[in-house]
Image: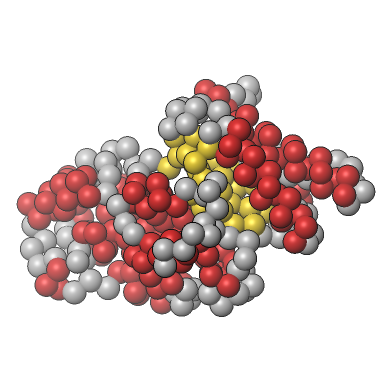
Amino acid sequence: MVRRNRTEIEDKNAIYHIIGNGVEATDIFADDVDRNKFLQLLQKMVNFHKVHLFSYVLMDTHFHLLLKTEEANLSQAMQFLNSSYAHWFNIRHIRKGHLFQDRYKSHLVLNSLYLYSVASYISLNPVEAGLVDSPEEYPWSSFQYFLSTQNQNKNVPFWLNIREFLKLCQTNPENFVNFVKENIQKYDPEKIFQNTTKITSNQIQNKSPKNIENILRKTKEQIGDIERNKRLKHLLVYLLIKKGCRVKDVANSLHTTRQGALKIYKKMQKNLITDRIYQLWLNHIKINLFS
């Protein structure tokens, strides 16, 4: 099977969630010297390739980046970063061979909801790994700089574009920091499931097809187009059925079959237990649509 060239799916002003993993779970950062070198190269990538970096975290075996490319050049930018760092790492640690697992993973971010959720997910990585109790305690993450922006501090690196991220998400530093911290205690899957689906009866009293259409209209205005965002559509199916809307009405409004809607609902039940991004999305949808 012929592999598609990455340039075929790249575009100008596109936003991506990037994940780089060490080969066979190898540590790609042995110490702070390695981490500082990676950040130096990351800064060069931002400058040389016209990249807008919104969020990052460096873990032992992998890293996450949230960024926007001015040009359709994600492949060139990531090749520079990964190959430059791998070359330096191998010389320093007297090793040979690949450092990273295949090619990096890239997920296209299509709307502000996904952007907001991914930045939150990245910020919480060190907490979920048990390295710190709160994300601002971890020095190798961009979350600390959201606190700096919140306090009007001048220490935010010039190559980290927090202000553009906040503008795209139509939020402010305080809201983002609070959103991330509210999710710190929600590691227990059952608690997450309960907290993110508890919507009071007065928030969705009318369960008629007309009310479903109103929710869909509000979704498109405030969050995104469900026809272009499969994840958002599935979460809406789950929420509407969960709150008592008839499966038939939900299916008709979202242009699927009754069996299809039920299949989506059951799939989402499993995803909400295991997938952190889905959990954050559900929180954000609840805040925007049912509050």
Residue situated in front as seen by the camera: 200 or 243? 200
In front here: 1 or 85?
A: 85
Q: Is residue 218 visible?
A: yes
Q: Residue at x 35, y 74 (%)?
A: 194
| Image position of 53 (left or right of 229) | right
Is residue 45 rendered to the left or right of residue 165?
right
Q: Is residue 214 above or below residue 67?
A: below
Image coordinates of residue 259 in percent, x first then y, are 29, 49
Residue in the image at 15% along x and 47% along y? 217
* Quadrant of the image containing the C terminus: bottom left
| Direction front: furthest residue | 154
Q: Which residue sits at x=17%, y=60%?
A: 245
Image height of 75 relative to 185, above or below: above
Front one among 10 and 36: 36
**Quarter of the image with the N terminus in it:** top right
Spot occupied by residue 19 in the image (x, y as percentages of width and height): 60, 47
Please give the name of the residue rendered at 23% of the width and 71% of the height, measured from the top-left corner: 199
Residue 107 seen: no
Relative to the observer, which residue lies in front, 15 or 167? 167
Q: From the viewer's perspective, is 72 left or right of 216? A: right
Residue extending farthest to the right is 94
Q: Quadrant of residue 177?
A: bottom left
- Horizontal and vertical percent for residue 60? 71, 60
Q: Where is residue 268, by image quadrant?
A: bottom left
What percent of the width, then of the height, locates residue 29?
75, 56
Q: Is residue 213 above or below residue 47?
A: below
